[in-house]
Image (cartoon, rainbow, N blue to C red):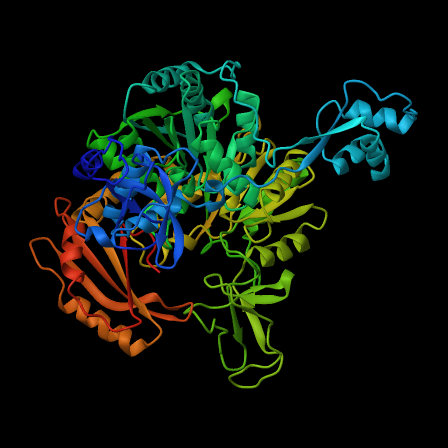
Amino acid sequence: MLSSEANSQACDINKSPQPFAAGRRVAVLLPLPLAGAYDYVVGDGMELHPGDFVRVPLGGRRAVGVVWGAGVGDVAAAKCRAVLERLDVPPLPEPSRRLVDWVAGYTLSAPGAVLKMCMSVPSALEPPPKSPVGYVAAAERPDGLKMTEARIRVLEAAWAPHQAADLARLAGVSPAVIKGLADAKALLPVPLPRFKPPADPDWKRAGPTLSEEQAEVARQMRASVGAGFEVTLLEGVTGSGKTEVYFEAVAEALEQGKQVLVLLPEIALSAQWLERFARRFGTKPLEWHSDLSDTARRETWKAVADGRARVVVGARSALFLPYPELGLIVVDEEHDASFKQEEGVIYHARDMAVVRARVGAVPIVLASATPSLETQANVQAGRYRKLHLPNRHGGAELPDLVLVDLRRYPPPRRSWLSPVLVTAVQETLTAGEQVLLFLNRRGYAPLTLCNSCGHRLQCPHCTAWLVEHRAQGKLQCHHCGYWSALPERCPSCDAEDSFRACGPGVERLAEEVEAKFPDARVAVMASDTLSGPSAAAEMVDRMARREIDLLIGTQVVAKGHHFPLLTLVGVVDADLGLAGGDLRAAERTFQLLNQVAGRAGRAEHPGRVLLQTYQPDHPVMGALISGDGGKFYAEEARARSDVGMPPYGKLVALIISGEDAAMVDKAATLVARCAPQGEGIMVLGPAPAPLALLRGKHRRRLLFRAPRPVAVQAMLKDWLAPLNLPKGVRVQIDVDPYSFT
C-alpha cells in the first residue's frame, strides 16, 4: 500500500522546463543499470529540452538516452563529451520522467533500469524501416489492356491498397495475374504501413442500458474525469457490470480528447474483454503484451508517444508507455497478484499506476469483486473513495455455494471427485448445461516418486519437484523451465518402471472425467495448453457455441470469462492455496475461489458451486458460504494489524543469492549482523528461502519489518551501502513483497 507521505513525494520531483542551448551541460539518463545520469554538453546548433531523446557517446560506442535536466557540473569541462544528435521522436513526457524517478526511489532500483522499461522498443526511436509495397487499381485502365474475368476480379478488389499476395488471395487468382496488371500499369504500387492501428474508438456510440444503480455509479465516475487526481475503488459482485460502468468513464475521457490506459492481469487471456470493448466503442483498443510482434510493439509505442493511440489495454508493462495526454487509468481485477513484477525492477503495477495517476493529475479506477486488503485500508483511511455495485446485472442470481466435506464424502481410491460432485456433474450434463471443474495445478501430477525407495524427481537447478506433463511426454520445472523425459530406472535404487504420479493436475483430472463421463465433450484450459490470445479466444468461443460440455481449468478460467450456459462449478481442491508461509494465503484463496464461483449462473440459468474441502471450518470457507466477505476481511485486517504486517506495517524482503552456497551464507550473516535497530523494527532471518536453489543460485532470505511511519528506503540504503559483500553474491530488494518463495 502506498503511504500518504509516499504519494505526496511523487509530486515533489523538480521540473526543468527551460531549454538548454549549445554549450550548456545536460544530464542524460541512459537505459542502463547505472548509478544515475551522465553529464554531456549540448552540441553546436542544437537546442534541447527535458525529455528529448538523444544519441550520445558512451565509451567506444553510441547510446540513446533521455535529457533529464541540467548537468550537475561535477565533471571537468574538458571531460564532458558532446551530445551527438537529438532524435526525431516526441519527448518522454514529464509525468513519465517523474514516474521513473519515483519508482527508482521507492524500489531502490537504478533509475536507468526503470527508464529501460519506458524505452522497451529501441527500434521505435530509429527512422522507420522501408514500407512494404501494396497495389491499388489505377484511376483509368491503360489503353489496349485485354480484360479477363480474373483481371476484373483483381481490379474490383484493389479499390484499397493490398500486398500482391493478399490481392491474389482476395481475387482468387495466381500471383502472375497481379504481376501482369502491375506491368501494364493497371495496378499502381503504393507504400503500405507495416502496422495498421485500429480505428479511433467512437465514444458517441450508445452503450447498453444500465440499471439505476449502475447509472449512478457511472455518473460519479464520469464526473471525476478531467477533475484531477482521484482514486476510486469500484467494488461489485461478479457479474454486476463493473466493466460496462467504467466504460462510461472511458467514454468521457475520449470525449475530452484524452488517452486511456486499462491494465488487465493477463491481457493474453482477455479475449472477451476486447470483444466487449469493441461492441461498446466500435473498434478494438491497441494492445500491449509480450505476445505482440516486433512490428506491432514498435508501431504501438510510436502511436502512444505521438498521441494517436486513444485507448491502450495491456499488462503491467503498459504503465511505462509514453502517454502525452493520459486522462484516465483503470486497473481491472486490481487484487490480482499478477500485477506484481518479480524480476528485474520489482514493483507492483497497481501501486505504481496510482503514482502515475498522481504525477499526471488524472483519475484512476481500481475495479474488483474482491478488493485487496491494501486497497480497502486506503478506503478506510480516506485516501480512496469507494463506489459499490452489490447486485448482478439483469436480475441474474448469485450461485448457491455448498461445501463438500471430503472427510465425510471422500473420493474413491485413485480418484479426486467426491460422489457428491460426481452426481452434480451428471445431473448438469443430463440437463444439457455446462460444467467447470477448477483445479489450480497444471500438468498431470505435481510429484513423481519411486514406489521402491521413495526417491522424488527434483529439478537439478531449483528446490522444486518436477511436474509430469503426460500429454507432452515430459517432466518439467515450473520455475526455471528445465525438462526431461521420465527415466526408465530410478537413479537412486535402479528399480525399473517404478515411478508413480502422486496427486492430481488438470491432465490427470481429465483422465478421471473422461472415464466417468464418456459421452461428455471435455477440454482443458490452462496456461500451458493455450498458445496465446487466439487460442484462449477460440476456447471461449467453443464454450459459447456449446462445443464443450465440461471444461477443466486452472486460474486462467477465473478471470472475467462469461459462459452463459455454465451452471455448475466444482472446485476440486479448495484448500490448495491455504498452506505455506504466505501472509496473504487466506486472502488470495478467498479471492480466487470467489472469482471461480462467479463463473456460474451469470445469465438466466441459476448456478451452483461445490467446493471440495478438508477444512470446512476455515474462515475462508465460512466467508464464501455466508457471502460475508466484509467479516472475513475485518478478521484478516485485525490479524495483520496485531503483528504489524502490511498494510498496517512495512515489509521488505532481502534475497541474498549466488552460485557458492558458503559465500551466500557468509554474506547473509554479514547482512543480518549489520541490520538496523529501533522501536518496532524487526529483522527475521537469514534463513534458506523456500526455493533455496533457483536457476542454479543458492538463496537466503531476510524479512525487514518496520512501522508505517519509518522511511524504510533511507534505512535500507544506510544499512546495505557500507557492506563489502563477497564477489558473485547479489542482494535483491523487494519492497512490499508478494511472493515468499
Front-most of residues 459 and 624: 459
Q: Is residue 84 left or right of residue 1?
A: right
Front-most of residues 201 and 142: 142
- The total number of labels drawn is 0
Q: Is residue 639 left or right of residue 299?
A: left
Front-most of residues 45 and 112: 45
Outermost residue, front side: 44
Q: Residue at x 9, y 59 (%)?
A: 677
Q: Residue at x 48, y 61 (%)?
A: 478
Image coordinates of residue 482 in percent, x first then y, are 52, 67
- Which quarter of the figure has residue 389? top left
Outermost residue, left side: 679
Q: Is residue 398 left or right of residue 42?
A: right
Image coordinates of residue 132 in percent, x first then y, are 66, 38
Q: Quadrant of the C terminus?
A: bottom left
Note whether 230 is above or below 574 in the view shown.
above
Q: Is residue 535 left or right of residue 140?
A: left
